Amino acid sequence: MRKKNFKLLASFLTILFFISCNSSLDKNQKENFVLENYTKKEVYITMRDGIKLHTTIYSPKNTSTDYPILMQRTPYSSKPYGKGKMKTKIGPNKHLMMEGNIMVYQDVRGRWMSEGVYDNMRAFITNKKENEADEVSDSYDTIDWLIKNIDNNNGNVGTWGISYPGHYATVSTINAHPALKASSPQACIGDFFFDDFHHNGAFLLSYFKAISLFGTYKDKPTDSPWYSSPKMESKDQYQFFLDNGPLKNLNKYFQYDKLDIKTSSIKSTVDDFFWKEIIEHPNYDSLWKSKGIIQHLNKVPPTVATMIVGGWFDAEDLYGPLETYKAIEQNGSDHYNTLVFGPWDHGKWAKETIENSVGNYYFGDSISLRFQKKIETTFFNHFLKGKGDKNSGLPEAYVFDSGKKEWKSYNSWPPKNIKIEKFFLNKEQNLAKKHLGKLINKIQFISDIKHPVPYSEDIKTVFTPRKYMTDDQRFTARRPDVLVFETDVLNEDFTLAGDILAKLKVATTGTAADWVVKVIDVHPLDTEENNDKLQNHLKMSNYHLMVRSEVLRGRFRNSFENPEPFIPNKKTSVNIKLQDVFHTFKKGHKLQVQVQSTWFPLIDLNPQTYVDNIYKAEKKDFKTQTHTVFSDSNIEFSVLKN
């Protein structure tokens, strides 16, 4: 008993020491904190199939107590490599760093200093044979080695990560090692046909520059980049992609000249294996299904506590964290599974900035800092250093209302007190709770293949787009190829909490089309609200804040596996699920819905003529068409009731 009390006292004094170090740190001291308080060790851990993975271990210099292990597995490098070279910040946040934890970073197989061949979203092997390995077994084998070989560890392990590292955190929970007690997948990829590079089958052309990051082959460890982004000859991405034409014309950016030994001639071949996968697998076939992780989350044991984190305005990974949380929830009440969603873009919750904005839109101060201190740190400390029971003091769902700009706590997500309300897209282009009149009216627009609707007013090229998620949508509302439906000025607050389903009734003169639905908060004309993040040409007066948006490639309206053309001029149902929102349209605002068919170059240009594989479409396939939206189309909202 005395020994146990001594260890508790030592742990408490260690935490006080680390916290006191943080109370008066200047910038230089903060940058040197890891160097002065941690030791670094680089090791290779052998997996069950013999592949060695490079692993970096940061251990507190104070060895008077035992510490839990916090691990991140990443394809983005665990650098800096080499003796004496150390990160200036380690762990999920500064509080966990200052308190003292053993922090571990690992290059996943085939990336950077690890051995093996990389596979982008490596498939999970459900029934492994002896010595067969995947990312699940790599996580298990790594944790097993760490527990057995790191001094002063308390036997408890937590995993975390943002974006792709968030995916690996999810992976670690499947058939988890008994020592894994807590995991926080954040902005985690769930399925590459719905996250990042695709949205409901539509290719996100805006991720073009990121393809080579994942698809450039490497067969030996390296501490230097072996990939390079395609060089775009223009700073205007809209014009660049429009001038390039069909997607097949982009193959040249991933081609390399090789000598054909048999013919002694030079041939150009596509060398990027990820680009090959994209262009050769346009449908949701066995390749994409095998890479998905959502369908395997029934294998997460109740011994692992999970906290899923995401941002309402994350342009990259919104599907993943929401679907990850929901899939684990389906496993039953034995699991400790919580959701945190704030007013962030991709990974912004890990920043230490006081002001929290996304693009032009300001949400408040210290939002990320509060999450790090009150939520994230509490979660890991409870399950790795504390009692580890379900009474963590944290809510099931801790979510930020992006309209009222305030946090709310609920016992479930979506909250239990929601009601589905239906709004029709009527002929006057109003949103109405009832379909007006007995006649079904047509609203038509021309989808000009040479003048697609831009997703942003900005003239630039980006690696991955983020800002557009809160962009002012007035510039699209004033185009003839964007249909606008909106309510009257609201007499009371109207809160959406949960997903949105657009049930469109449409037709086209062609045989193919994409359909885009955007939900928008129209601010009052007389508002005096402004902020220093606004672009110079904007005011908050009448600001059209995009709350949620989504695309469906029309060929997949009935099946992502088996695409089908439209029959010209035939009325057809197209249902589009928009991911969850938590947003209050305040009294004096208006709720608006925009419907369009192009969203360029966020997504690639649909030829509007059905072809088996859009990535191989010819220039002659691209044709301007007239699209119709019928007035019995409706939007189903999840509305929060008091």
Image: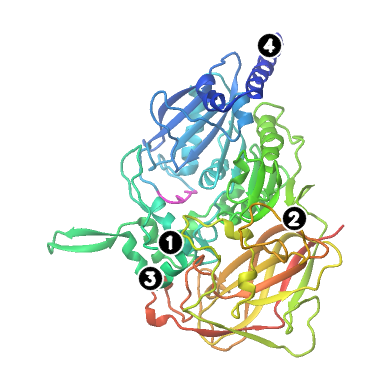
Q: Amino acid at mark 1?
A: Lys
User: In front: mark 2 or mark 1?
Assistant: 1
Q: Secondary structure at mark 2?
A: loop
Q: Quadrant of the C terminus?
A: bottom right
Mark 2: which amino acid? Pro
Q: Amino acid at mark 3?
A: Asn
581 over 148 or under it: above or below: below
Amino acid beneath label 4: Phe
Residue 6 image label: 4
Decide: marks 2, 1 in contact (CB < 8 A)?
A: no
Q: Main secondary structure of the magenta part?
A: loop
Q: How is the image coloured?
A: rainbow
Marks 4 and 3, how far apart at CA: 69 Å
User: Could you tell which of marks 2 and 1 lies nearer the N-terminus?
Assistant: 1
Vertically, is 381 above or below 273? above
Dot 1 or dot 4: first in sequence order is 4
Residue 120 is covered by the magenta coloring: yes
Residue that numbered label 1 is attached to: 235
Residue 325 on image: x %, y %: 65, 50
Distance of label 1 from label 4 (alpha carbons): 63 Å
Q: Which residue is disc 3 drawn over?
A: 244
- The part of the chain drawn in magenta is 119-126
Task: Give the class, few, some or many, for how many residues have Cα within 10 Å of label 4's Cα (few <14, many ≥20).
Answer: few
Residue at 69% across, 34% down:
373
